[in-house]
Image (cartoon, rainbow, N blue to C red):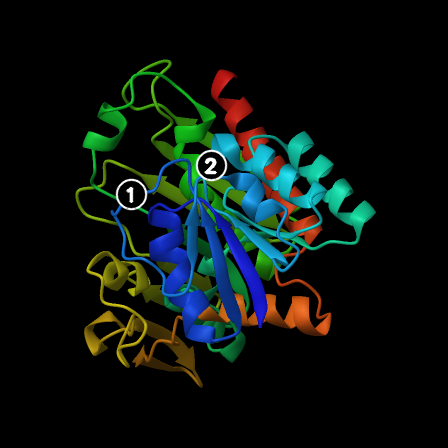
Amino acid sequence: MITTGFIGNGKSTNRYHMPFVLKTGKFKVKTIYNRSIKDDWAKVEGAEYTTDLDQLLHDPEIELVVVTTPLGNHYESAKKALLAGKNVLLEKPFTRTLAEAEELFAIAREKGLMLQGYHNRRFDADFLTTQKVIESGKLGKLQELEMHFDYFRPEVPESVSEFSVDTSFLYNHGCHTLDQVISYFGKPDKVDFDLRQLLGDNRMNDYFDVDLTYGDVKISVKSSYFRLKERPSFVAYGDKGAFIKETKDRQEEDLKKFYLPDHADFGLDRPQDYGVLSYMEDGRYHEEKVVSEVGDYSLFYEALYDTLANGAEPLVKEEQTLLLMSLLEEGIKSLGE
């Protein structure tokens, strides 16, 4: 088992990491550091909770440190862990700047350590199902893909009085969808950004529309905090058909209800959640529901274990993270243009 420590003990650790770490049975969570120890979350059995970061960093048994603190603390915490000789898993969106990310990877290479970004949404059911449909060939030649991550939560941007990278919608949610695009399609030939502050200048970035071009394929990544009716999660168009997946992966919905992965139906799409594939074949029109792939965030930790224990290539590669950081930086800069 990989002996693991966590820097941070909030929602990220307890909702988006711990259920899946424990599900694998391959990681021993030894120490959890937080600046203050509260009883907001159930304690992990066998783990020691501490307000002394050095206790975690100087423990020779700990091989992996998972950083789940707010973005402003990512660079500092990851650097301390790497310099202490620990492999590091760093929550999205990794760092504030590309330069910080490059420095951390340089330290990891110098010390022969693994540094990886946490992109669990590569195992979203809607994303996996859309891949399956594209690869089936029933769409024909892919022409366009639309990806939406919408909310109707006006209270979120309304509660933020001034602009910050840390609270920007692009950094906090665009990182998910952009990573999905990068993981499947690679580096784009061209990128166009339309970022907005719908509540006015110097307010939160609460909307983005990013177009990525791959040859003659256009991929649009769009999100807003002001969509009373959400757009479909995925829409794929080919020269022979179209696929529409209305609903998002359901793992997060279950986690918010504390319905955890130890339930057999955790995160599973229901028949009403299945996407619809329409296509032409031999001159005839076909329409069918596509049974969703199973989303499972624990697969990220399975891959992480394989990297640390068996030397497998990291799931989230350095060049993918650096590309993502460059896109996030470029997008934020476009706000001032």
Q: Residue tagged by mark 1?
A: 38
Query: At which x and y percent is residue 135?
Result: 53, 75
The extreme right residue here reads 110
**Quarter location, residue 223:** top left
- Among numbered discs 1 and 2, the one appearing first in the sequence: 1
Q: How far apart are marks 1 and 2 (CA)?
A: 28 Å
Residue drawn where x is 79% and y is 54% of the image:
112
In the image, taking residue 282 as reference, residue 313 lies left or right, namely: right
Question: Residue 314: in sight, yes or no?
Answer: yes
Give the residue furthest to the bottom. Answer: 282
Which residue appears at 29% of the width and 74% of the height? Answer: 268
* Residue ID for mark 2: 171
Relative vertical location of residue 129 with respect to residue 264 in this rendering, above or below: above
Q: Nearer the viewer, mark 1 or mark 2?
A: 1
Amino acid type shown at disc 2: Tyr
Asked if residue 3 is positioned above or below residue 177 in the image, the reply reads below
| Residue 297 in view in this figure | no
Count neighbours of disc 1 (C-alpha within 10 A) and say few if under 14, some if 14 to 19, many if 20 or more. few
Q: In this view, does 75 lie above or below 120?
A: above
Above or below for 200 versus 261 = above
